[in-house]
Amino acid sequence: MLFPTLAFGVFFLFVYFTAWSLERENGRRKLFLLLASWFFYAQWDWRFVALLILSAVLNWGVGALIARQPGAKKAWLVGLGVAVNLLILGFFKYYGFFIEQAGDLLMRFRWERDLPLLQIVLPVGISFFTFQGISYVVDVHRGKTPPAKSLLDVMLLMSFFPHLVAGPIVRASDLLPQFDRTPRLTRAMATHGVLLIVWGLFKKTVIASEISVNLVDPVFFDPSAYGAVDIAAAVYGYAVQIYCDFSAYSDMAIGLAALLGYSFPRNFDQPYRASSMQSFWRRWHISLSSWLRDYLYVPLGGGRKGLVSSCINVFITMVLGGLWHGAAWTFLAWGALHGGVQVIERLFRAALGDRKVIPTVIGVLVTFHIVCLGWILFRAESFDLAMQMLQGLGRIGPVVALTPLLLTLIVGGLAMHWLPPRAIEGVAERLKAAPSLTLGLLIGAAILLVEAVRPEGVAPFIYFQF
């Protein structure tokens, strides 16, 4: 059940009206939202609803044990909370990858063995709800958030359908206090939420889908059939596609939550305007980058032990962040590229101090093209295809894939980054005082326009696979 579909629209209308009919009965309202979220998740595979329940019970129980037995809280956190969460994630997401690598290694030493290779179905969104569970138990251990008052709250925290399958990773300290109080829906929240949903629909169904189907997918499938212009367009197109695809999901998730009376943190902040790789990660997938910082980089030691330690820790963090995205060497290489560039940036800053020797516009251009180089690794199915893409950038050939429409969408997708910051919030502020009929007509016209210009069908969101 994808967000931009009629089936989801009917589902959400039912959830919206039922949830607000239970406005004064917060316990029943939360129970209804939990059941609705499980129904939503079951549309992919009903069997994995049990995994959601198991994960929530685990993290609620660990949080309770940490609070009741503070003398053993580290043992409960590491031995049960973090270890079991990572075991669940590792089994479903990385078992096949590591078994294959072990088999290849044994074969090189001529120690061939029949290893137990299982056909494991990857649960949608497992990385997101597992990381959410880890952040909950770690924050309880650190004293940053009190343990949840009920198992229901933890279950809803991890299963709430707007963020369940592709984020953002909402911290317990942000969402649990909202579950405790009676929700309210202001005119400003409703206007902002609806505008974010419409804006997300446009980015996903018009820009991302068109670029994906007619440019990125065919070129990355067989780079040898295309010349330099088409390959360069596909690389830039993928940069626009993945931004519009994932930021669209985040926008819609934030908007849907707002219509139900809850606030999610912003997940993107014009990332291609970044003038350094460190700045890029402060703007791209903010909930993941801040998670990696707080729950991986800082526990590794951060920068407390000096420059060398800081460089090692940021490199390890980015490599593991690459592995989080997928069980493949290309994702590890993508993370290593981002980590290596951040190490170089730190060394340059340490050598130059506060002196600024690179103009901001040059920093933006260089950072953007390093990010695009990384996107080749991220998107390619193998190193061989990634090398074919790079080699094709020097091959002269006819332009067969890039069309005026696709060029317009790529340029427009990049131009979004130079809109005024928080432009949607500004529009919502201006519209919130408009008469309801006028506002309804404007939003209805926008939805009809998106429906009229979008291509047929809806491709799955890129981050569903993570």
Image: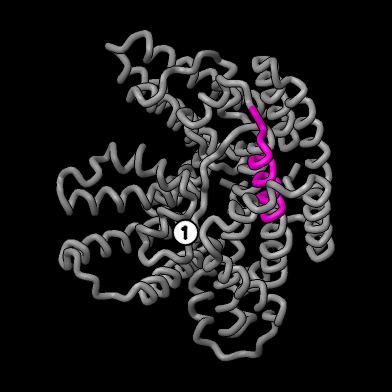
How many residues crowd around disc 1 within 10 Å: few (fewer than 14), some, or many (20 or more)? Answer: many
Residue at (47%, 35%) from the top-left corner?
131
Q: Which of 12 and 288 is in front in this view?
A: 12
The picture places residue 80, in percent across and down from the top left corner, at 40, 20
Q: In this view, does 308 lie above or below 120?
A: below
Q: In this view, does 219 lie to the left or right of 115?
A: right
Residue at (52%, 25%) from the top-left corner?
176
Q: Is residue 193 located in the magenta-colored stretch of the structure?
A: yes
Residue at (69%, 17%) from the top-left corner?
24
Q: Nearer the viewer, residue 422 or 159?
A: 422
Q: Is residue 240 located in the magenta-colored stretch of the structure?
A: no
Q: Is residue 439 left or right of residue 354?
A: right
The picture places residue 224, in percent across and down from the top left corner, at 60, 79
Q: Which amino acid does label 1 sit on?
A: Thr
Q: Main secondary structure of the magenta part?
A: helix
Q: In this view, does 282 lie above or below 173?
A: below
Q: In this view, does 173 lie to the left or right of 200?
A: left
What residue does disc 1 label?
Answer: 330
Find residue 280 and report its image quarter. Answer: bottom left
